[in-house]
Amino acid sequence: MRTMTARACAMALAAMLVCAGSAAAQVVAIGASNTYGSGRGRTAGGVDPSQAYPAQLERLLHARGLNVRVVNAGVPGDTTAGMLARLNSVVVEGTRVVIIQPGGNDARRGGGGADAARNVEEMSQRLRSRGIRVIVLRNPLALVPPGSRDPDGQHFDARGHAAIARSLLPQVIGALH
């Protein structure tokens, strides 16, 4: 009887390890319209969220054999204060990496650079205290090729999102390990 119990326990433990090993690691991308992907609409160069950098990053990670889910927590028009306010609701237990993309909405809404910097630092500290790795995506405009932006110069088309995803790929892989 003990042999059967020990064998059953060993098989259950092995099954749990296999399941744990196959569970997708979670990455959350939090930001505004350039994270979400909408811009000013697909006709003006914006993209569907399925073509935004979080979705493209997930596909790149899968192509490298990594079982990673990238959650798009972008909200068009959001500010860093808004991101900070919803941080706990979008970064659920088990999240391993968070990509923070502060945009230009703080400045457009009267918030200064110092407010945005404080909010990003507060988000980073909260996440790190939970054991979550943080990547801050600053100045994504510098990452995108010419001609891959909306006429407003601020939002990206699918090529711009692809460039951001490619740029983030090694950082995310490094943060996952």
Image (cartoon, grey):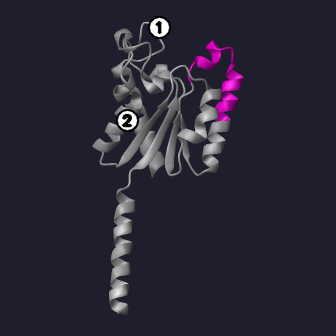
Tell me where residue 146 appears, x and y as whole percent: 38, 13
> Residue visible at 36% across and 38% down?
58
- Write down the region rendered in magenta: 103-121
Choose top left, top right, bottom left or bottom right for residue 151: top left
Q: Nearer the viewer, residue 79 or 113?
A: 79
Element under disc 2: helix
Number of marks present in the image shown: 2
* Label 1, residues with CA under 10 Å away: few <14, some 14-19, many ≥20: few
Tell me where residue 124 appears, x and y as whole percent: 62, 40
The image quadrant where one finds the N terminus is: bottom left
Confirm whether the magenta stretch covers residue 107.
yes
Element under disc 1: loop
Q: CB of mark 2 within 8 Å of CB of mark 1?
A: no
Q: Which residue is mark 1?
A: 152
Amino acid residing under circle 2: Leu
Choose top left, top right, bottom left or bottom right for residue 167: top left
Q: Which residue is mark 2?
A: 57
Magenta: predominant secondary structure element? helix
> Residue visible at 38% across and 46% down?
68
Amino acid residing under circle 1: Asp
Confirm whether the magenta stretch covers residue 136.
no
Q: Is residue 34 left or right of residue 131?
A: left
Task: Give the answer, above or below, for where 118 lies relative to 68.
Answer: above
> Residue visible at 38% across and 67% down?
16
> Residue visible at 53% across and 46% down?
92
Tell me where residue 165 appears, x and y as whole percent: 39, 31
Residue extending farthest front:
1
Residue extending farthest top:
151
Which one is earlier in the sequence, the residue at label 2 or at label 1?
Answer: 2
Distance Cα–Cα, label 2 vs label 1: 24 Å
Q: Nearer the viewer, residue 63 or 43?
A: 43
* Label 2, residues with CA under 10 Å away: few <14, some 14-19, many ≥20: many
